[in-house]
Amino acid sequence: MDPKDEALVAEVAKENEELKKLWEEHMEYKEKIGELDRRAYLTPVQTVERRRLQKYKLAGKDRIEEILSHHRQV
């Protein structure tokens, strides 16, 4: 994400609880995916978990972008 967007997230999250929650979840998913990526080998269960986390992260990012898009227009 662009540093300008991260600054906008920080600003808008002060007033928007949904955005704040989405951003926190996004960062948690990013960390968990990173932990899995640092492993030399993933079990089938870990591979499924990584895919699940990626889907949740992407869905949250899409919603974050929707919220930010609205605030850019205002």
Image: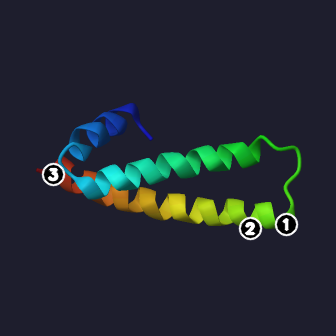
Q: Which residue matches tag 2?
A: 48
Q: In this rendering, would 31 be left or right of 38?
A: left
Q: Dot 2: what SS?
A: helix
Residue under pointer 3 = 73
Q: Quadrant of the N terminus?
A: top left
Q: Residue at x 21, y 52 (%)?
A: 16
Rendering coords of residue 35 (x, y %): 70, 44
Residue on which disc 1 sits: 44
Q: Secondary structure at mark 3?
A: helix
| Residue 74 horizontal side relative to residue 42, left or right | left
Which residue sits at x=75%, y=45%?
Answer: 37
Q: Position of residue 51 (x, y in %)?
A: 68, 64
Closer to the chain start, of discs 3 and 1, is 1
Q: The residue under label 3 is which amino acid type?
A: Gln
Dot 2 surroundings within 10 Å: few (below 14), some, or many (20 or more)? few
Where residue 64 appears, x then y in whole percent?
A: 35, 55
Specify the amino acid type for callout 1: Pro
Residue 42 found in image quarter: bottom right
Q: CA distance from mark 2 to mark 1?
A: 6 Å
- Indicate left or right for 64 with 14 as reference: right
In the rendered view, tell whether residue 45 sits above or below residue 9.
Answer: below
Q: Nearer the viewer, residue 12 or 32?
A: 32
For the residues labelled 2 and 1, say whether their Cβ atoms are less than 8 Å apart: yes
Measured as percent of width and height from the top left, residue 3 is found at: 39, 32
Which of labels 3 and 1 is toward the front?
1
Q: CA distance from mark 2 to mark 3?
A: 38 Å
Residue type beneath disc 2: Val
Give the Cα separation between the discs numbered 3 and 1.
44 Å
Q: Quadrant of residue 17?
A: bottom left
